[in-house]
Amino acid sequence: MTQRSAFITGVTGQDGGELARLLLGKGYRVHGLARAPSRFEWSRVEGVSGARQNLFLHKGDMRDAVSIARALHGAQPDEIYNLAAQSNVGLSFEQPDETFDVNAGGTQRLLRATRLLGLGDRTRIYQASSSEIFGPSDGHPHTEETPFNPCSPYAESKVHAFETIKHYRDALGVFACNGILFNHEGPHRWKGFVTRKISIAVAAKHLDIEAPLTLGNLDACRDWGHVRDYVAGMWAMLQNDVPEDMVLATGEARSVRSFVEAAFAYVGHDVVWDGRGLDEQGRDARSGEVLVRINPKFYRPVDPPIAIGDASTARRVLGWRPRVTFQQLVHEMVQADIERLRILAAAGEAPSLVAAVAD
Ligand code: NDP
Ligand code: GDR
């Protein structure tokens, strides 16, 4: 049997590394597009047999059509996973043009290149869409039928990319689908996302490293799953008989506040809350020490109060369901940061990781 081949944009990101690991484990040849291939962490695919021989990194940028086409031409993939994005919702309010150019423009460039290279007939395409396209829509949980109501430049860019995929599927007959994924996290989550900020700060507290935790909207509720389950769902969507847009979610939403409580509980601290609004603080129930403060800079101009998804289509059609529980996710993330910080602290480098969460 010939070896299957996949092309992943955004291979240096959280999902890209996890997906590369999954596909290499299935025997694929994997081609990754990266702005800086040297930034790929090979530890993400450690222990997978043949990873070094079967993973190829191509330098390219989603804002540059030629670099995408060159990499695609070299890869000749059976499957494309378009994961590259300016994925930070908060930052998209400050950098809307770059966000649109990478997320919406980049998707168009990728699809045009696929067609120009004559890959449209044989290559299946997965697009990383997002629950953010629903915005603060009424009616929960969100399904594939929920109307879009984007409320950030990031969400707008993802709606545009969603429509591009639909156009290539419906008008041009390409096997292309949108995975509408709700938040998924893990130990390789970028440090600016709220779950990782929390896991780093909690790990630091556990190791007596100075790391104040300052957050924004504690009451935002998100449907948090584990990245491992979600990349399995991406792959399953491209093995389906027909291209179909699908929601992947756990069906349970929890607040940022609950994430903080679960993370501190893992290292033996009960958090109690006092004060209101910007003056609210989370304290250690026993010692009274302040563990969490609020900083208005982490609030967004608009923030959907809750995101919760219904993945029954994926369950029915693909047999997909999330396996990792919320508690397991929180514990895995905190434990991973404890182990990382121990190593960094021994080398005198812990402050660099801890400082990163304050940005
Ligand atoms: P990350 O932010 O961890 O990764 C984003 C990737 O995109 C990085 O590899 C980054 O490369 C790359 N990238 C950014 N700009 C460019 C560019 N101009 N050219 C080429 N590559 C670029 O995101 P995730 O892995 O968490 O998410 C993957 C995708 O899924 C994204 O599209 C995101 O919007 C979407 N998504 C994620 C969800 C989640 O909860 N994780 C939920 C729903 C959707 P570099 O290393 O150079 O910065
Ligand atoms: P999100 O993830 O915007 O959902 O986007 P993020 O972790 O940034 O925010 C989740 C919620 O937490 C609130 N929040 C904070 N967020 C950050 N980053 N920092 C804080 O200090 C803080 N305090 C409270 C936010 O306001 C928000 O309500 C992620 C990304 O992966 C997107 O690319 C993806 O599309 C969506 O998930 C689904």
Image (cartoon, helix red, strand yellow):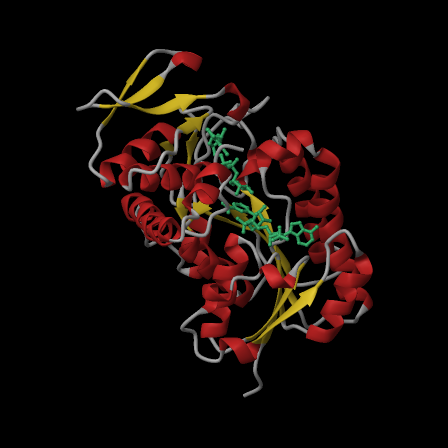
The residue positioned 66% from the left and 59% from the top of the image is 36
Q: Position of residue 233 (x, y in %)?
A: 47, 58
Q: Position of residue 165 (x, y in %)?
A: 68, 52
Which residue is more in the foreground, 274 or 9? 274
Examine the rendered structure and indicate whether residue 202 appears above or below residue 116.
Answer: above
The residue positioned 34% from the left and 35% from the top of the image is 259
Q: The N terminus appears in which quarter of the rendering?
A: bottom right
Q: Determine whether, in the image, residue 219 is placed left or right of residue 114.
A: left
Q: Is residue 161 visible?
A: yes
Q: Is residue 119 visible?
A: no
The residue positioned 67% from the left and 36% from the top of the image is 156
Q: The C terminus appears in which quarter of the rendering?
A: top right
Which residue is more in the foreground, 116 or 191? 191
Judged from this view, the residue extending furthest toward the bottom is 1
Examine the rendered structure and indicate whether residue 331 appears above or below residue 52.
Answer: above
How many marks the image carries: the answer is 0
Q: Determine the image quadrant of residue 297.
A: top right
Examine the rendered structure and indicate whether residue 296 appears above or below residue 44.
Answer: above
Q: Position of residue 231 (x, y in %)?
A: 48, 58
Q: Determine whether, in the image, residue 198 is placed left or right of residue 18.
A: left
Q: Determine whether, in the image, residue 101 is placed left or right of residue 266.
A: right
Which residue is more in the foreground, 161 or 87? 87
